[in-house]
Each structure stands twice: as structure tokens, then as C-alpha cells.
Amino acid sequence: MKNILLFIGIALIISTSFAADIFDAQFNGSLSGCITQNVIGAQEWYADSNSGDEFASMSGYSGGAQDNEDWLITTAMDFDSYSNEVAVFKNAVNYSGPALQLMISTNYSGTGDPNSADWDDISSSATWSGGSFAFVESGNIDLSGYTGDAVYLAFKYTSNPSDGAAKWEIDWLTITGTPLGGESLVIAEMTTPVTTVITAPSVSVDFTAACISNGTADIGYGNSTDGSGWTWESATVSGSGPYTGSVSINAPTPGTYYYATRWDIAGKEYYGWNTDGQTNKTTLSAEYTWVVTNPTPPAAKLIITKVVDGTLVGGTPKAVELSNTGESVLDLTDYTFALFSNGSGTPSYTTDLVGTLASHTCLTLCSDYLGGDTNFAVVWGQAPDFITGTCRGNGNDWYAILDRVSGEILDLAGPVPDDYILYLDGYMERHISVIDGSSTFVSNTWTFSGNDAMDGFTAQQISNAIPTMGVYRQVPEPIAIIAIILGLGALFSRRK
């Protein structure tokens, strides 16, 4: 039977005094299309996260405060098509250093050194964080005094050895305005799918749209949040108000899909994708998803067999060993390696695995932080197979293997979401009899060195304590052992 999802788009008439988004940046895993210009220094703006929150960050600290001038700039905004423009954003700061500046320009070219253009410093219009990484909202910043079809808003960061290097974080930057020209706006509300996890193939998605006039409304879906690479299908709307229409689409392959509606109003595209009744946005940054899973999810034959928190410089090497306990080669692209930090119930860091892993072999993972990968090679005589920043556990951070598509936990090394300390300056090792993954932590299937068990250990002592890192140790299932014995018995009986 086909899995049916119902999407509903509801269009409401809103007066022209209602604001629409001109620019919207949520910084979910990216800089949301913002322009970055590095004028001075080696450090730059980057996409950052902490405990599941995602934002844009900038720090000029690298072993000390460095000379930096770095800009985070919106794309060009057409203020000639709007009135009553307002900006709002969230910001946080920590450490000492020059204040972040909020700048606006009507003659920047969109490329090159921002200092070649004229910028107004409007920093005093915003409310700024007082420190300790405490996010505050800027308040509504009036931009209605600026006109032009290419207006840019920017954050200018500076640091230097004398004044210091603060770390600034920016989130949820939105610029809104009232569209000119007298056209009515549309609010498109999308209901969350009745079922958010469905199984391919043969997935049918039905979409119903309601609009203020005859015409078309589209539904789009794809694997990116910004609409790149999306498939769009049109629904012809007709009848009498509200005008309705529907379209059926097929999700092609397993994966995580974002979805949204798209409307054309007086030659301008608007987007909607939530149930909050907000105005349509003029840029797409979808928030809601459905997940299409594999017809048969990968078997949990990839398990975590060792976790190490080393005692060399920087607490390295921090390493994890994964083992393929199955009888066939595993496609590692089916799996994601994850870390749950400090008792978190959701992954704080993830790494999608790549390549394949042969039956009854191991994969070693390590962080290169403070030379951790080099220390791994010193301890165990060979480089780790996979270098990833997700290997950063400190004794109370739990590792897991996830289904790449659904995010389901296939194997877990630690009591999520608890904050126990189990392997600080030590290690934990899976019993060799365990060959199946578990979505819950079973402590009696692990051997623990005890916290601080390796305090003061040299590389050789760590190697002696954990001599088999990267060497397969699990024993086969009892039924397999019996089969081997019976097979050997039959072989010798034939030789008589």
C-alpha cells in the first residue's frame, strides 16, 4: 500500500500594511547566502553550533588576539519595492574585544573590499549582548530611511592585540518591509505531514492549495534548505474563492526532504512552509521535513567496540573503534557517527561515514585536535582510518551509530541522555560476545577501565592497556560456531 502524506496550503488575504520578509538568514549549518569579506587577518566568519543551536560566528583569537577586520554582509536588497523596512537579529558575545558594528550601505558593489563603499554605522540602533554567550534580540531596527535597489546590511568585526578578540555570534537575521504597488499578500500555511517517516519506493504525496484567485501554486521539495536542486510541481487552482487545486508527487529516493509552497504575486515569488501563519518569505529557507527511509534499513552489524579518552597532550588520543560483525561488506554511507555531549538527548556532533568495511574488520576513528591523530599513530603504530572532530568524548559524552537516512540509533555507547562519567582518562571495551547493535546502552556488555585509570600513562603504557585497537575480536554467533564444527566434522569424515 502506498504511504500517503497530506500537505495543505491555506491562503489568506492580508492588507498591504503587513510585513513580508526581504531577507532571512537562519544560519542553520551555513551562512545562509551571506557575503563574507576578509579584509585583515587569517580568521573569518563561519557557520557554528553549540548544543544543537546553529549560528554565524567570528573570533579573532588564535593563540592570542590577532589583527582582524571581517565583514558578514547580506545579499543585495531591493528597498525600492518596500516601505517600513525593519531589521531584527539575535546576538551573543564572550571575551573582551572591540564591539561588533552594524553597518548599512546603498552603494556597495556586492564584491570586494567593503571599505571601497560608503557605510553608515547604525550600531547604536541595536541592543547588544552583555557577554557570557547570552543571546539577546536586537530589537526592531528602523531602516526606512534608506532607498535603492541594492541595499546591504553588514556586521563588521574587528580585533587586535591591544584591545583583544571577542567572539561574536549572530542568529535569525531578518529584514522585513511592506511591499509597494497595492497587491495583496498571501499567507501560506503548510501542515506538518501526518507521517514524517515513510518508506520508499512508491511514495505518493498529495498537496492541496487554496489561493485568493485563479492561477497556480507550487509545492517544492528537495534535500537542501535553500531550494537549490528542488523539484517543483504546479497545482492549477480554480473554482470560486477560496480557489483550490491539488497535485500529487513521488519522492524519488530515500533521504531527508524539505518542503515548501511557492506563490507568484504581481511578478514576485513568495514562499511559505510552516503552520505559524507568518507572511510569505521572499527567500526560501525551509524548516520542515519528512524522511523517506530505505525499504530495508541497514542491519545493525556495525557496532562500537572501543572508546578511548587518552592521557597524552590535550587528553589525546581520543579514539573510537567500530567493527563490522556481519558476514558481508558494509556500505558505510548508510551510517552516521554521532556524539551526544554532556547528557544531551540529541546529537551534538555528527559525521557521515564513507567507503566500505569488510566483514569481520574494524574501523578506527580519531580527532586531529592537538595532534591526536599523530598520538594515535605513536600509541598503536599506525594512523587512524578516519579523522573526525566528532571524536571528542571526555568521559561523559556518548557515541552512537545512526541510520544515515532516518537518524535512528542503531548502536549506542553510553547512557543517553544521562551525564555519568564512565571513561574519563580511560577506556571502555565491548565484550567480544556482542555482535549486534543496541539502541539502548547495556552496561554489563562493556568492560570499563575506570575513570583516571590511565592518568600519567605514556604512549607505550596506553598501548599495553589497549593492545588490540583496530584488530577484530568479536566472536561469531553460536549458530555459526556450530556450523563450523559440523563442517569440519564432515570434512574429516570424508577423509577416512
Image: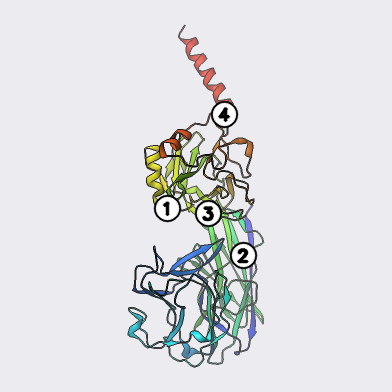
Between the C-alphas of marks 1 and 2, the distance is 48 Å
For residue 206, the mark is: 2
Amino acid type at mark 1:
Tyr
Does residue 390 sit above or below 285 in this rendering?
above
Residue 151 visible, this orientation: no
Q: Residue 154's image quarter? A: bottom left
Between the C-alphas of marks 3 and 4, the distance is 31 Å
Amino acid type at mark 4:
Glu
Q: Residue 469, position in %: x, y?
A: 45, 37
Residue 346 visible, this orientation: yes
Q: Is residue 100 left or right of residue 67?
A: right
Between the C-alphas of marks 1 and 4, the distance is 38 Å
Contact (CB < 8 A) between labels 4 and 2?
A: no
For residue 254, the mark is: 3
Q: Secondary structure at mark 4?
A: loop
Amino acid type at mark 2:
Asp
Between the C-alphas of marks 2 and 3, the distance is 18 Å
Q: Earlier in the sequence, mark 4 or mark 2?
A: 2
Q: Secondary structure at mark 3?
A: loop
For residue 477, the mark is: 4
Q: Residue at x 54, y 22 (%)?
A: 483
Which of label 4 and label 2 is nearer to you?
4
Q: Earlier in the sequence, mark 3 or mark 1?
A: 3
Q: Which residue is mark 1?
A: 369
Amino acid type at mark 3:
Pro
